[in-house]
Amino acid sequence: MAKTNINFLKYKYFSYGLSSVIILAGIIFFFVLGGFNLGVDFTGGTIIHLKLEDGYLMDDVREVLEPFGLSDAALQRAGGAGDISGGSEVVIKVPSLDESTRNAIIDAFMERYGIKEADVLRMDNVGSVIGGELSREAVLSLIIATAGIIAYIAIRFEFRFALSGVVALLHDAVIMLAFFTIFQIEMSSSFIAAILSIVGYSLNNTIVIYDRIRENLKFKRKRSINDLVNDSLNETLNRTLYTSATTLFVLISLFLAFNYFIGGMDLKAFSLALLIGVISGAYSSLFIAGALWVSWRKKDAKEEKYVG
């Protein structure tokens, strides 16, 4: 196989710009749409996920909910490819309801649409206190994970590697948040699990590249740091692409299975978050992490004579 010779650092400003555009779009949509689409896991409340009929009308759903004072409930169409343009399922998010009210709502939908118990795909009730605790624990988990990563990379490599790696990992997490905000995909506790999974996956890619950079530093001869990093990225490129491609094949299969056969919004969102994260992780490992390390190394006057 011919040796690849891609000048990754040549595209660093394009990469920075692309990431900035996606993140900026996420920020704009965050304020325009009023924040993240948080599930009841975080906000507290009741979520009812029902399978109705193809082409149902949202106005009809609100009509069923009106006797319960819930005509202004947050509704989301779901079900197969219809998540955007159609679908036979509806997700209803309302403030916390007692069991008798929840059962009465289900009975009303059974009467209106002739659905059966098997068509009640999900009915959860989460208190606001539990939702608040979950939010705090999610943030704490991310902080602990980030601190551990910084310590690990700083000890194994050097502090500049640690900072560059963490920025690349945070980049992947923010990109996932941006996509979920732009498309208003519901974030539940499974989203936090997806972020932590991608942090570990992306870190593995980045460490392999950093390890090759460290090895090449011992034999840098007269190569500039730019050339050395590009060589390291090219030497690990096949491994990065093969690993990412095989992972993507599995995740695409899971996403299609959850989307068309198994169902369940949490599983769909989880598999979609992993898909976005794997793509972003491969991208940041190749175009962000190494470029950041080179930029910070060049600022060190003691290393100036080695850089090109």
Image (tube, helix red, strand yellow):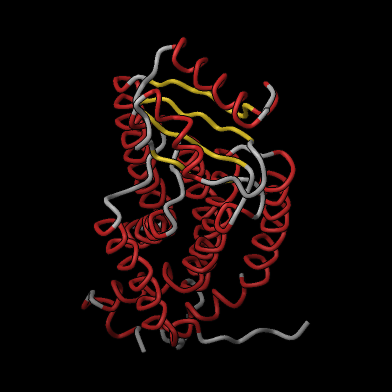
The residue closer to the viewer here, 27 or 244, is 27
Residue shown at 62%/53% (left/top)?
82
> On the rendered structure, is 22 left or right of 282?
left
The residue closer to the viewer here, 172 or 12, is 172
From the top left corner, tell me how far across and down residue 100 is, in percent.
Answer: 46, 10
Give the quadrant of residue 68: top left
> Which residue ends up furthest to the top in the rendered image?
100
> On the rendered structure, is 161 left or right of 287?
left
Give the quadrant of residue 25: bottom left
In the picture shown, does residue 16 fall above or below 155?
A: below
Residue shown at 42%/52% (left/top)?
184
From the top left corner, tell me how far across and down residue 74 is, in percent.
Answer: 39, 39
The residue closer to the viewer here, 92 or 257, is 92
In the picture shown, does residue 211 fall above or below 195?
A: below
Residue shown at 45%/35% (left/top)?
63
From the top left corner, tell me how far across and down residue 60 is, in percent.
Answer: 51, 40
> On the rendered structure, is 83 left or right of 63?
right
From the top left corner, tell me how far across and down residue 272 is, in percent.
Answer: 57, 52
Residue shown at 61%/24% (left/top)?
111
Q: Quadrant of the C terminus?
A: bottom left
